[in-house]
Image: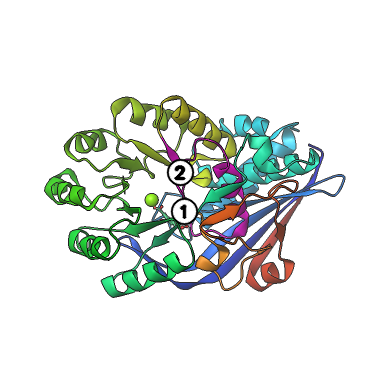
Amino acid sequence: MNIARIELYIIQMPLKSPFLTHLGAVESREGIIVKVTDKAGLSGYGEGVAFSTPWYTEETVKTSLHMLTDVLIPLIKEHPIKRPEEAAQLFQAIRRNNMAKSALETALWDLYAKQESSPLAKILGGTRSKIASGVVVATDSTAKALQQIEQYLVEGYQRIKVKINPKQDYSFLAEIRKLYPELPIMVDANSAYTLKDIDRLKALDELNLLMIEQPLAHDDIIEHAILQKEIRTPICLDESIVTFEDAKKAIELGSCQVINIKVGRVGGLFEAKCIHDYCMSKDIPVWCGGMIEFGISRAHNIALASLQGFTIPGDISASSRFWEEDIILPEVQVNKGYVQVPNTPGIGFSLNEKRLQEALLSKKTFAF
Ligand code: OSB
Ligand code: MG
């Protein structure tokens, strides 16, 4: 791919309002922007989506930086590649660290698409020109949740996801359901329950939820299969699926009826596409998850969600959901419930250099 240099930008930006789950609050987001430049001067961008602390997965911004600096970038430097799939293959020799791998692999996909003068969505096999947009409500009071839902529906979002836990579930959701009898609502528990809560979870069946995401342990597929036999609400797995093999096993076992595909969680676009293809062959619908991300990762999500199997609106919201000003131009916008898939080369968004500089904590350059 004729790589001339790789740059890492470590950035930080406050969220417009805190994002609350039972695992804690995210008020400010640290992230890594990867820029890979080729000898012709074309640049591809990727984003590391690990958080500052390991609350969602084991990775952090610091572990990602270590992996990129000391392992992944040297690997690409030692083994010149022709296509991004070769990077995914090289990274298989490294255990886990999926978000670090994805940060670099997605940048290589963007660069490759630009070298081919083709939109990334098209390179990946995407067929949609626009994707349905959903949004997440993550707050600790019913009043705030209702206020946010009202606002998001005005903005056109097609589907609302609400974070739940045993202290805030049935009555909270019943109130929302009463006001919006027809609204497509899904819930995400981020592992807040155990099998002891089976009756609490059964009670949610009558609320006509689209699905319940990751009710049980972050690394479980056995107990989810037991739970799915007891509840009518479809189970969607998020945290439990970090590889293609995980997806296969979970589907075989009946642990879920839906899968949330996050590019960072599974180690890049190649693995994400493999999971998508397999799910399609098994009639398992998928949707694209979110990571409270900046615009670069959002842009990769849009390209991925243009694939045929992404039949459910994902957590791909507008840049303005989290940020006063995003780091890409133009910002991601939601129009009548849809996000347009760009038809210009690569991810189809450029870096907002001014905003990047405002958010910049530090920068590293690797010459090839
Ligand atoms: O569990 O899906 C999750 C955000 C950060 C970490 C984990 C999750 C989330 C979300 C998506 O719920 C938020 C978004 O980016 O829209
Ligand atoms: Mg989730």
Q: Is residue 114 left or right of residue 210?
A: right
Q: CA distance from mark 2 to mark 1?
A: 8 Å
Residue 113 makes an appearance in the image: yes
> Disc 1 marks which amino acid?
Asp
- Give the residues in magenta: 285-314
At label 2, counting other C-alpha atoms closer than 10 Å, the crowd grade (few under 14, some 14-19, many 20 or more) is many
Residue 220 position by quadrant: top left
Q: Amino acid at mark 2?
A: Trp
Magenta stretch: residue 355 in it?
A: no
Closer to the camera, 305 or 242? Answer: 305
Report if the beta carbon of the residue with label 1 is closer than 8 angstroms to ligand 1.
Answer: yes
Residue 212 tag number: none
1 lies above or below 300: above
Q: Secondary structure at mark 1?
A: loop
- Residue 297 falls inside the magenta stretch: yes
Q: Is mark 2 within 8 Å of ligand 1?
A: no
According to the image, label 2 marks what residue?
Answer: 287
Query: Where is mark 1, residue-wise?
Result: 315
Residue 237 position within the rendered picture, expressed as x and y whole percent measured from the top left? 36, 41
Tell me if 243 is positioned left or right of 307 in this view. left
User: Residue, x 44% and y 56% (percent of image)?
Assistant: 158
Q: Are marks 2 and 1 in contact (CB under 8 Å)?
A: yes
Task: Estimate the x, y position of residue 280 in percent, counting from the top left.
Answer: 47, 29
Name the foreground residue: 204 vs 227: 204
Q: Give the secondary structure at mark 2.
A: strand
Which mark sits nearer the N-terminus, 2 or 1? 2
